[in-house]
């Protein structure tokens, strides 16, 4: 007798339907129904069955919502903790993703209602502690449209029938080959992987390839040659990220697995001649800009130009100023060989861009330093307004930003200070930006430059006198 806690599946199964347990290691065939909640099955292939193993029913479109009650509670916890990514399992249709998006919209409404009651910045600051202080700091850097990125895990063959619609409402896709290989024919998995990566890339969204990439390293210190080829081929297919699961969660060599995965990916990227090229016409037709209610008339041309300029000039990097991360997504899909340095003022955007291939995000504040010392709260009085003024002054929210030359100079200085290994003085770079509300001087621009020129230009201004201009 095998017991399970999903009676919905039992009710839908019919004679001759397949039931797969433990990633397909045990295969059953339904013979007949004994009762509403009981089936008689034949064991086709068997082995020891342990508790809490997965169940797959490849012949059914399971009438179970992708979001269970526990999932909803977990989603609320993720929202409250301001997590950046949430992976949605067993997506079968567009509505599964939309249900999660609608749930997060409800969370936003709840917060907005609370902010009407709480003091400014939406928190009862009269109970401020270290955690609340960090929370407020984070709030300042989050855009009003913030929400966790929804990554849809494609592990059911039914999802493939509606994949274009699922991609449209998702922020990214995970090719979950484990369950996918159980539910559909194994020989189809490589073709499905390539097709999914291609579709997600032309939609200009991140795609993650996962499951059993270095499976043998759960028990062995080195992978098989076939696994090495598998990881490299995922890179050549155009995946943005590769993911380890059991190798790190339960394996004996977790650190070695990560090092090996990184080494394979880096070597594969150095041999970019084998990387699949993305059709630019398909990108313009299916990409981010095409789905906007009010498309930017210039952004596709800017992304095309930046990618082409970097390739033609053999630039060491593309420096992208981004408000939402969209411009970075677009350029990353067009140019798979250049390093992309993404400059943003939003900590959430900085973190979400880390999943994109070849992108190195950096957080920089371009507000002017007004030269005034931060206001310190009166420790004897836990005054709400005083705490808020202190926070605002620390982040200098007066609204004044550096001019374009100063922005470029500060960018170069910050890269040299924080990551000197990224670029050297004199390296060729392409600088670009789409629509950027805080840096109007950089809006809709593509500029070719030598790294360090902006610092020299800005420094030379200190030697000028007003009289020298006449």
Image (tube, rainbow, N blue to C red):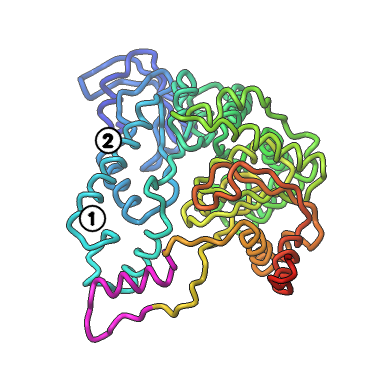
Position of residue 68 relative to residue 257, above or below, is above
Which numbered disc covers residue 41?
none
Q: Quadrant of the N terminus?
A: top left
Q: Is residue 429 left or right of residue 180?
A: right
| N-term-proximal mark, 1 vs 2 | 2
369 shown above or below 330 = below
Across the whole image, how many numbered discs are drawn on residues? 2
**Towards the viewer: 301 or 406:** 406
Magenta stretch contains residue 386: yes
Which residue matches tag 1?
Answer: 115
Q: Of residues 255 and 399, which is closer to you in this image?
A: 399
Residue 71 shown left or right of residue 364 in the figure:
left
Going 22% across and 63% down the picture, which residue do you hit? Answer: 119
Within 10 Å of disc 1 (Cα), the crowding (few <14, some 14-19, many 20+) is some
Secondary structure, mark 2, is loop
Residue situated in front as seen by the camera: 51 or 126: 126
Write the start and end of the magenta stretch as one range.
Answer: 375-397
User: On residue 5, which mark appears?
Assistant: 2
Q: Is residue 246 above or below residue 206?
A: below
Label 2 environment density (alpha carbons within 10 Å; few <14, some 14–19, many ≥20): few
**In the image, what residue occupies the spot 33% across and 71% down?**
389
Vertical placement of residue 331 versus 10, above or below: below
User: In this rendering, would 445 be left or right of 57?
Assistant: right
């Amino acid at each position: 007798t095998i017991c399970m806690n999903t009676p919905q599946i039992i009710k839908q199964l019919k004679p001759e339907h397949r039931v797969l347990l433990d990633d397909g290691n045990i295969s059953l065939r339904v013979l007949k129904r004994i009762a509403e909640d009981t089936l008689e099955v034949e064991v086709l292939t068997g082995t020891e069955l342990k508790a809490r193993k997965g169940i797959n029913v490849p012949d059914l479109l399971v009438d179970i919502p992708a979001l269970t009650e526990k999932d909803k509670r977990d989603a609320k916890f993720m929202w409250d903790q301001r997590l950046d990514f949430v992976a949605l399992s067993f997506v079968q249709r567009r509505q599964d993703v939309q249900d999660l998006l609608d749930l997060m919209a409800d969370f936003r409404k709840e917060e907005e209602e609370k902010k009407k009651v709480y003091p400014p910045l939406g928190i009862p600051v009269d109970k401020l502690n270290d955690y609340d202080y960090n929370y407020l700091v984070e709030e300042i850097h989050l855009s009003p449209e913030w929400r966790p990125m929804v990554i849809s895990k494609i592990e059911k063959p039914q999802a493939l029938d509606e994949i274009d619609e699922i991609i449209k409402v998702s922020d990214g896709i995970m090719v979950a080959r484990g369950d996918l290989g159980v539910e559909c024919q194994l020989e189809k998995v490589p073709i499905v992987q390539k097709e999914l990566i291609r579709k997600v890339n032309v939609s200009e969204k991140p795609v993650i390839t996962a499951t059993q990439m270095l499976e043998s390293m759960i028990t062995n210190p080195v992978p098989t040659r076939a696994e090495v080829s598998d990881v490299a081929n995922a890179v050549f297919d155009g995946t943005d990220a590769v993911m380890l699961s059991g190798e790190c969660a339960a394996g004996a060599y977790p650190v070695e697995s990560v090092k090996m995965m990184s080494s394979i990916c880096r070597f594969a990227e150095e041999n970019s001649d084998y990387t699949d090229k993305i059709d630019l016409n398909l990108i313009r037709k299916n990409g981010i800009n095409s789905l906007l209610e009010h498309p930017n008339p210039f952004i596709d041309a800017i992304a095309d130009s930046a990618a082409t300029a970097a390739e033609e000039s053999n630039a060491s990097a593309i420096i992208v100023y981004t408000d939402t991360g969209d411009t970075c997504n677009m350029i990353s899909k067009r140019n798979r060989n250049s390093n992309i340095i993404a400059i943003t003022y939003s900590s959430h955007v900085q973190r979400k861009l880390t999943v994109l291939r070849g992108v190195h995000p950096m957080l920089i504040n371009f507000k002017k330093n007004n030269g005034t010392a931060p206001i310190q709260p009166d420790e004897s009085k836990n005054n709400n307004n005083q705490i808020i003024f202190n926070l605002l002054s620390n982040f200098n929210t007066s609204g004044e930003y550096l001019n374009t030359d100063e922005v470029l100079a500060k960018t170069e200085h910050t890269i040299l200070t924080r990551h000197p290994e990224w670029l050297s003085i004199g390296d060729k770079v392409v600088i670009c930006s789409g629509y950027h509300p805080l840096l109007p001087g950089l809006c809709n621009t593509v500029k070719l430059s030598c790294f360090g020129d902006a610092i020299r230009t800005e420094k030379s201004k200190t030697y000028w006198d007003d009289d020298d201009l006449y």
